[in-house]
Amino acid sequence: MGKKALGVLILHGFTDTIHSVRILESPLIELGLPYCIPALRGHGEGSPEALQRVVWQDWVDDAKTAMGDLLRDVEKVIVIGFSMGGLLGIKLTAERHHCVDSLILVAVPAQLHAPIAPGRPFHFLAPVMMRMLKKWPMIPVYADRELAKEHDSYSWVPTDSIQSLFDLSIESRKSLKNILAPTLILQSRKDITVKPKSADIIYNEIATPAGEKKVVWFQKSGHQMLRDCEKDRVAREVIEYVKGRL
């Protein structure tokens, strides 16, 4: 049998597991599309200590490996990235543009809310904070508190991995100018992890022609857009876009 025209690569977020993006799995199966949801290095283990000494280049390598596996069965890939997974999707698309059909970015941190994040007022203090603190608390942010009870991601991370996330954010933003692929950007205005203006930053800095890039705004969700109160609509927007690429 020959290769299928399209497959889907889904990349989860920082501290998350593959369950954070699983809402997209059943619709893709119904469409008969090959897909891959890799567990990124250091994630989904018994302890956040698994992230110790893992750097952003490791996550990029994991994404590249998953794409390579998918390309055995398909000609091109639709890349879907949630949060940090979207940063990886940007890097992947910029470097392997000939393999990517299109890009879907959900709550992607071109700019984080944290005051010590890149581009924020106290970023200069980040190295000091990283030396002082060995563990960084990760508090799940949901609009629906009942849904937050089902959250299964790490509750803290080694501080070094926060620095790696910062570095990835900087590197991915540089890559936007090298992307021409059709792009869908989904962002909640109530996100207090990622600054909502991240959607505008990505839209304005990505080289994709204006007619082939789009931002869809949500009004209620916290950062976990694929698990929070608007998850069904978010998933529907993603799947309808995928259908449009078939």
Image: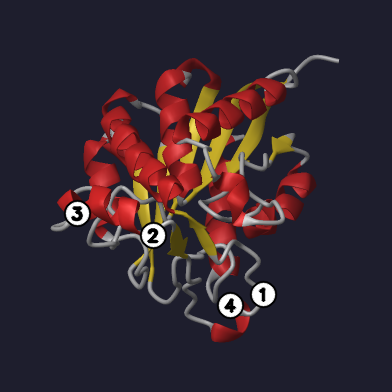
Image coordinates of residue 29 in percent, x first then y, are 78, 46
Earlier along the polypeptide chain: callout 2 or callout 3?
3
Q: CA distance from mark 1 to mark 2?
A: 22 Å
Earlier along the polypeptide chain: callout 4 or callout 3?
3
Earlier along the polypeptide chain: callout 3 or callout 1?
3
Image coordinates of residue 64 in percent, x first then y, are 58, 25
Check disc 3 and report the residue beneath it: 125
Check disc 2 and report the residue beneath it: 187
Q: CA distance from mark 4 to mark 2?
A: 19 Å
Q: Residues within 10 Å of mark 2 (few under 14, many from 20)?
A: many
In the picture, measured across the screen, residue 70 lies left or right of residue 163, that is right
Q: Quadrant of residue 36?
A: top right
Which amino acid lies under the numbered mark 1 shown in the image of this protein?
A: Glu
In the picture, measured across the screen, residue 235 lies left or right of residue 215, that is right
- Considering depth in this image, is 194 or 232 the residue closer to the camera? 194
Q: SS for tag 1?
A: loop
Which amino acid lies under the numbered mark 3 shown in the image of this protein?
A: Leu
Earlier along the polypeptide chain: callout 1 or callout 2?
1
Front label number (4 vs 2): 4
In the picture, measured across the screen, residue 111 lies left or right of residue 218, that is left
> Are the residues at dot 4 and dot 2 in contact (C-beta closer than 8 Å)?
no
Check disc 1 and report the residue beneath it: 150
Residue at 78% of width from left, 48% of height from top? 30
- Considering depth in this image, is 131 or 111 the residue closer to the camera? 131
Residue at 73% of width from left, 18% of height from top? 72
Q: SS for tag 2?
A: strand
Compared to residue 70, the image places residue 159 above or below, namely below
Q: CA distance from mark 2 to mark 3?
A: 28 Å
Check disc 4 and report the residue beneath it: 148
Q: Quadrant of residue 208?
A: top left
Earlier along the polypeptide chain: callout 4 or callout 2?
4
Which amino acid lies under the numbered mark 2 shown in the image of this protein?
A: Gln
